[in-house]
Amino acid sequence: MDRVLGGGVVPGGLMLIGGDPGIGKSTLLLQICQHLGNNIKIFYVSGEESGRQLKLRADRLNVHSDNLYILCETDVDTIINHIQKEKPGLVIIDSIQTMNLAALSSAPGSVTQVRECTSAIMRSAKAADIPVFIVSHVNKDGAIAGPKVMEHIVDCVLYFEGDRNTSYRILRCMKNRYGSTNEIGVFEMRDKGLTEVENPSMMLLSGRPHNVSGTCVACMMEGTRPLLAEVQGLVSPTGFGNPRRMATGFDYNRLSMLLAVLEKRSGFFFSNLDAYINVIGGLRLDEPAADLPVALSLISSLKDQAVKDDIVAFGEIGLAGEIRSVTNIEARIGEAARLGFKKIIMPYHNLKGVSNRSDVELIGVKMIKDAYEVIT
């Protein structure tokens, strides 16, 4: 959590956290209370649960802090009066859609109520230098429900993501006035609450099949943290007039562009074939360095030839079929070597500034065909 926030909670900071129902937002914040409750007084304002329900959840999560105070209230004026009177070190509002101001006639959860309640809480928190976590619901598209101005008001916007069918959760920062917006935190949901995943790369590669065509390991940067993720590609004859293209965890338009480059520049034809890309573990690869592993997984499936298990690839692909340079080379190489990979396929132009290593073989490639020759 500290990594995602840019080092920790800033006094007077207003942090908005959103996510799907049941993903673990309230669980995460209640566990934070246990860690911070040793030193500061915490107000947990709940508009959705009663005190008895919170007590049951706290017992299950082993949260027993003497500095944690529960306030089951939805009237913002009453909440602000309690904050000004008690002067807590941290306030948690769960959730903003249940709060209301008596001066407004609209119903709780409406655009006006959400905007004005957030503004009132912000003014109170900034005046007293009290950090506030605000839980917000999301709409069916996955964006934070309510007016967009709410995201402008707060200092930090966090999204809690994850597939509800798996136990892993990713906390992603979309806006941060005090740190980077590229950092992520990886957690695992267990029966006793959320636990930190200290080695996300190992988690994302667990269960990887061996000697199977269509899989390639990519090395991505999430802020300052390098992550290894498995990219799977599947190419099969189409049963329709137009071939299907589908991507999970990768940009669809980027996939279409890569298929066009592979056909035009490299001689790998997909025009009458369905092409599917899937990134394992619920991760989303937005970085251009994911181009090369995606292309290699597609070629591997097309030729039905497996990429060796000890190979990692990263690099951006241009429209001429060339492999372009990427950043953070040393961090990527170090992470791959730490997990036991022996060969790294990378842009040729990045080899210049890399120190020699004895534990891993660095293979610089200029074109897509050069990368294919390496995996064969």
Image (cartoon, rainbow, N blue to C red):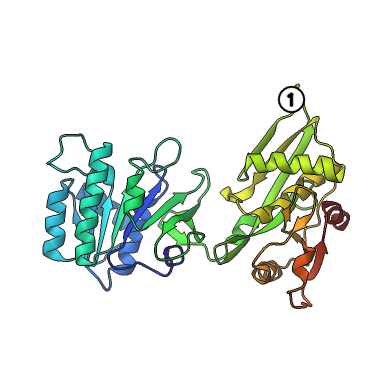
Q: From the viewer's perspective, is residue 231 above or below residue 359?
A: above
Residue at disc 1, secondary structure: loop
Q: Nearer the viewer, residue 182 or 319?
A: 319
Kind of residue indicated by mark 1:
Asn
> Picture coordinates of residue 341 (x, y %)?
74, 66
Measuring from the top left, give residue 172's x and y in whole percent. Answer: 47, 55
What residue do we see at 67% from left, 66% from top? 332
- Kindly tell me whether residue 47 is visible in this rendering: no
The structure residue drawn at horizontal position 60% and vertical position 45%, both measured from the top left corner, is: 249
The residue closer to the viewer here, 162 or 344, is 344
Q: Quadrant of residue 13?
A: bottom left
Residue marked by disc 1: 242
**Residue 191 at what x, y percent from top left?**
42, 53
Q: Residue at x 26, y 52 (%)?
A: 93
Looking at the picture, how far across and down is residue 229, in whole percent? 65, 55
Q: Residues within 10 Å of mark 1 (few under 14, many from 20)?
A: few
Farthest-out residue, top: 241
Is 89 on the left-hand or right-hand side of 290?
left
In this view of the protein, which residue sits in the foreground, 49 or 279? 279
Name the residue located 86 percent from the left edge and 56 percent from the top edge: 370
Residue 338 appears in view: yes
Tell me the quarter of the picture where residue 111 sits. Answer: top left
Total residue callouts: 1
From this view, report whether residue 369 is shown above or below residue 272: below
The C terminus appears in which quarter of the rendering? bottom right
Indicate the quadrant containing the N terminus: top left, top right, bottom left or bottom right. bottom left
